[in-house]
Structure formats: C-alpha cells, structure tokens
Image (cartoon, rainbow, N blue to C red):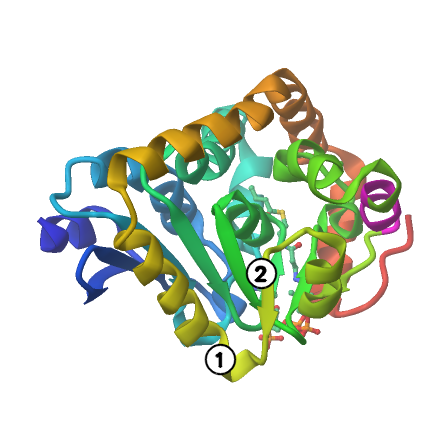
Amino acid sequence: MLASLEARYPGLAFAWPRPGVLEITFRGEKLNAMPPALHRGLARVWRDLEAVEGVRAVLLRGEGGVFSAGGSFGLIEEMRASHEALMRVFWEARDLVLGPLNFPRPVVAAVEKVAVGAGLALALAADIAVVGKGARLLDGHLRLGVAAGDHAVLLWPLLVGMAKAKYHLLLNEPLTGEEAERLGLVALAVEEEQVYEKALEVATRLAKGPKEALSLTKHALNNWFRTFMPHFEVSLALEFLGFQGKELEEGLRALREKRKPQF
Ligand SMILES: C/C=C/C(=O)SCCNC(=O)CCNC(=O)[C@H](O)C(C)(C)COP(=O)(O)OP(=O)(O)OC[C@H]1O[C@@H](n2cnc3c(N)ncnc32)[C@H](O)[C@@H]1OP(=O)(O)O
C-alpha cells in the first residue's frame, strides 16, 4: 500500500517509525521548496491515507530537517503561465490546508529549520507543530508581491490574535520558533536537534490514545476553523489574483537576485 502511494506521489516517502505512527517525509527542491508535483501530492494524499490500515497518527516532516520554503519558483511560474494552472493550484492550496485539518487522525509536524509560504501553511494546518527554537517561520507572500492569503487569514488571527497577526502579516515579519511558541502560533519549540524526537514522542502518545475519542475531539476543535471557512476561501482567491499581477514580477525577480524588492 505504502509503495503504491510512493509511486503515486513523487517526493513523498512513507514509514512506520512506531506502531500506528505513519511518517511522511517530503522531498522538494532547495530548502524543500515544493515543485508542482510535490505541492499536488501534499494536497491530495490525505484522501488516500484514509484507506491505509492502522494509521493512528501522522508525523509530517521535510527531508533533511528543513520543513519547506513553500511553493517553488517553478510552481509560481506555472501559475503565472495560464489561468488553468492557476485554478488547479488554487484548489491544491485549499486542500493543502484542509487535508490535514480534516484528516480523522491527529497530525504532528516536525519543523527544524524553515517554514515559509505554503510550507508554513502545512505546518500550521497540522494539529500540533513542534518547531526548532531558532527555526525561521514566515508567511512570505508580501515579499513576493501577493496577498497573505491561504492559511494565514484563517489561522493567524485565531491563534495569535488580530493585532499580532496584522503586525507579522502586513510587515512580513519573520518569527523564530521560540517567538512563535510564546505567541501561541505553534504548540512546542525545542532545540533544533530535539525536534524530531519530540515530534515522534508526541505522535506516539497520540497513536496510543483512544482512537475514536481523539478523532471526535479533533473534529470538534476544528469546528472553530470551519466557522471561518468563507474568509479562508475569499482570502485565497485574493492571494491568487496576485499570482498574475505586476507586483509579483518584481517580487520574484528580487528573490532570485537575493535583494529587497522595490515595489
Ligand atoms: C502556491 C504556493 C504558494 C507559496 O508558497 S508562495 C511562497 C513561496 N515561497 C517563497 O516566497 C519563499 C522564498 N524564499 C525565501 O524567502 C528565502 O529563500 C528563505 C527565507 C526561505 C531563506 O532565506 P535564505 O536562508 O537567505 O536562503 P536563500 O539564499 O534565499 O535560498 C537558498 C537557496 O534556496 C533557493 N530557494 C529559496 N526559496 C525557493 C523557492 N521557493 N523555490 C525554489 N528555490 C528556492 C534559493 O534560490 C537559493 O538557491 P541558491 O543556493 O541556488 O542560490
């Protein structure tokens, strides 16, 4: 079963590090940025996981301890090239957040170093994120010249309050893992070299918990997010308008040239 999932989803590897804990390791480009096939896989895999026997918790990690710098430059170029691609990635971006949120078993993310853009969306959509104290967490969209949409407008105000959400999103201000824990954006920040062990410990505890009661508790807690779902989809649409806009051209060029954008 896992081998067929690996064949179906390039860039994803599956393992059972403990009974009941399904580990998904994803491998992308530099800083684990997500090329189109990986972005699609991380959005779609959740439906197939429901058919895998014995999953009691999912542990999600990026290869090499880097979680992810978000959508790859190639993915963004693809979105710029046609409305068809833009719409396809729009639905993927929605499922990248809703997949882990709606998955019936608890999901734990292990973020050692970097979570930006869609990478941060994925980490925050997990039920429990364990991050390195020095990890760099950044929404990142405004630097690119598009609106901070996807997960951020749904999750940040609920997790850290509107004032801090506006400060970090409007100024595109990064957070360390330690700051993110203090603000309540993530559950746990530990030393970088302890992130995986801690995340595995949390996932193992969850896998030993009462399966049905945990699932119902997750469902009930996520009703909070579901209340805000219309905002999420509208914000995602506003973000995606920018992927074919003028400001993105400068944002993308500046990123590639490693300089500050001049908007
Ligand atoms: C639907 C999708 C939505 C989205 O996810 S939109 C958001 C897309 N992601 C971004 O905008 C993030 C872009 N990257 C960054 O802002 C920075 O990077 C970081 C803050 C993540 C890290 O900064 P630093 O430590 O200074 O590293 P570095 O020199 O900028 O990057 C190291 C290497 O990684 C490559 N890289 C970084 N991000 C991406 C990416 N998103 N796609 C492809 N490659 C990427 C660079 O080019 C470079 O490569 P080389 O070593 O060859 O110079």
Q: Main secondary structure of the magenta part?
A: helix
State the SS at label 1: helix
The x and y percentages for residue 189 are: 61, 68
The x and y percentages for residue 103 are: 35, 35
Farthest bottom residue in view:
193
Residue 116 is left or right of residue 164, and the answer is left
Does the Cβ of the disc 1 residue fall within 8 Å of ligand 1? no
Residue 103 painted magenta? no
Quadrant of the rendered structure where residue 59 is? Answer: bottom left
Q: Nearer the viewer, residue 197 or 43?
A: 197
Does the Cβ of the disc 2 residue fall within 8 Å of ligand 1? yes
On screen, residue 64 above or below 207: below
Residue 241 is left or right of residue 88, and the answer is right
Mark 2, residue position: 69
Q: Residue at x 51, y 48 (%)?
A: 122
Does the image show residue 7? yes
User: Magenta segment range?
Assistant: 165-171
Residues packed near mark 2 inside 10 Å, few (<14), some (14 to 19) or many (20 plus): many
Residue 170 painted magenta? yes
Q: Amino acid at mark 2?
A: Ala
* 2 vs 1, front mark: 1
Mark 1, residue position: 194
Quadrant of the rendered structure where residue 245 is? Answer: top right
Q: Nearer the viewer, residue 162 or 153?
A: 162
